[in-house]
Image (cartoon, rainbow, N blue to C red):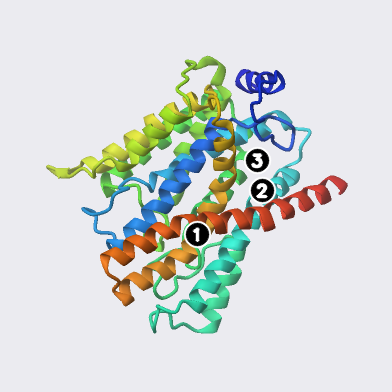
């Protein structure tokens, strides 16, 4: 258990009315501030999608300009948390058991998100003829989506590799990162892991300046950018966990770090000057330097008095809201495009979507995800 986790445990058991942090399957307390920040990042993605649809993704009118960077933040958090949760369990734990545990953690919500996307595609009352497609193509997308695998694009879904639920592209990359960790990365010396992170940072920065944005990797036209976006943050998160005791003990707290994340996301889009795409350089700076610093600070921070419950709830809802919101926003997209609502109506419906999507995500978590994971973990222990 890390020094930070030990402090959490001591504070919780000392009384004083604090809410205990959630614990991993092995009884380790979560990093409550990192849990809370993951929820903040997920909500920024949701707000970005809702507001972006209302302005037809007109860059000058989009407010949460850099919200796609939340995915890179998730990858970095994933590397850090996987190192924390599993590094000390080898070789007692087999590769097969690791894969089973990760599937139990991630896949129930993949199924829910894909089924919601399938229903959305079939039942959308505002799509008109834009989503006319053969049953065979639709069922192929469904079957592949239920496995979190890429499938051929569908009409009215851009060039998405996961056309029934676009955000599932990042879950596919998450699985690839988990496979790489179990088969290779866990065995690497920390120095080699750091070197790979540096090399991947160079590749990531070059690609970011080339495209001028990190918002790549979800479609077939730039599929190769998905593993590029995964590599640096995931490797760096794992490396940060392993060298955590040698790093400066920065501590800012949940609210200041939340404000930093929001500031990163709403920072204006930068122009291209002399052929150099400043926006890509800014986003590379955020992913390569700021996000690792935020993770280090978050790992050494306490939630603060009265904020533990908020961090816990934010962490619990982060994955469900991320993976369930987009099927409903496909309908929102077609409504805005084809029903031509007034700005006032769009504002009212867009605002109402936030609590609605939170309610759907919370329901999916309580009714499906947590009970299914509990049963599957129990079955795995019996086996």
Considering only order in the chain, which callout, 1 or 3, is on the residue closer to the N terminus? 3
Which residue carries the number 1 mark?
A: 356
* Image-based side of 95 in relation to 79, left or right: right
Q: Are marks 2 and 1 in contact (CB under 8 Å)?
A: no
| SS category of the residue bearing label 3 | helix
Q: What residue sits 39% from the left and 84% below the top?
A: 129
Establish if 90 lies above or below 42.
above
Locate residue 17: give its quadrant: top right
Taking depth in this image into account, of 174 and 126 the one nearest to the observer is: 126
Establish if 320 lies above or below 304.
below
Which residue carries the number 2 mark?
A: 105
Q: Can residue 57 be spotted in the picture?
A: yes
Taking depth in this image into account, of 279 and 304 the one nearest to the observer is: 304
Locate residue 144: give its quadrant: bottom right
Establish if 124 lies above or below 70.
below
| SS category of the residue bearing label 1 | helix
Q: What residue sits 63% from the left and 32% below the top?
A: 30
User: Closer to the camera: disc 3 or disc 1?
Assistant: 1
How far across and down, in percent of the image, does residue 139 sit?
A: 57, 77
- Label 1 CA crowd tier, 10 Å (few <14, some 14–19, many 20+): few
Which residue carries the number 3 mark?
A: 182
């Amino acid at each position: 258990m890390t020094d930070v986790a030990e402090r959490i445990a001591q504070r919780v058991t000392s009384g004083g009315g604090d809410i205990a942090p959630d614990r991993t399957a092995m009884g380790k307390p979560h990093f409550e501030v990192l849990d809370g920040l993951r929820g903040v990042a997920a909500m920024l993605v949701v707000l970005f999608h809702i507001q972006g649809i209302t302005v037809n993704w007109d860059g000058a009118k989009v407010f949460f300009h850099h919200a796609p960077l939340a995915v890179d933040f998730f990858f970095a958090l994933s590397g850090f948390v996987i190192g924390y949760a599993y590094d000390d369990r080898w070789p007692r734990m087999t590769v097969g058991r690791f894969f089973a545990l990760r599937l139990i953690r991630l896949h129930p919500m993949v199924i829910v998100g894909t089924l919601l996307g399938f229903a959305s595609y079939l039942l959308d009352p505002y799509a008109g003829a834009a989503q006319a497609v053969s049953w065979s193509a639709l069922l192929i997308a469904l079957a592949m989506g239920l496995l979190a695998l890429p499938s051929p694009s569908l009409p009215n879904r851009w060039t998405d590799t996961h056309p029934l639920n676009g955000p599932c592209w990042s879950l596919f990359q998450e699985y690839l990162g988990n496979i790489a960790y179990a088969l290779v990365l866990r065995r690497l010396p920390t120095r080699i892991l750091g070197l790979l992170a540096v090399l991947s940072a160079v590749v990531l920065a070059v690609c970011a300046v080339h495209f001028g944005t990190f918002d790549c990797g979800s479609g077939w036209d730039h599929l190769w950018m998905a593993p590029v976006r995964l590599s640096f943050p995931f490797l760096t998160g794992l490396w940060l966990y392993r060298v955590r005791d040698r790093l400066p003990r920065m501590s800012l707290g949940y609210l200041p770090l939340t404000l930093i994340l929001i500031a990163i996301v709403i920072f204006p889009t930068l122009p291209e000057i002399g052929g150099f795409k400043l926006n890509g350089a800014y986003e590379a700076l955020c992913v390569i330097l700021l996000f690792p610093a935020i993770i280090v600070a978050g790992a050494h921070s306490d939630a603060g008095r009265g904020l533990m419950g908020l961090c816990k709830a934010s962490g619990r809802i982060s994955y469900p809201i991320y993976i369930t919101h987009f099927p409903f926003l496909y309908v929102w997209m077609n409504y805005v495009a084809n029903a031509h609502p007034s700005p006032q109506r769009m504002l009212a419906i867009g605002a109402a979507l936030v609590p609605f999507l939170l309610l759907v995500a919370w329901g999916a978590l309580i009714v499906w995800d947590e009970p299914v994971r509990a049963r599957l973990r129990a079955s795995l222990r019996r086996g």
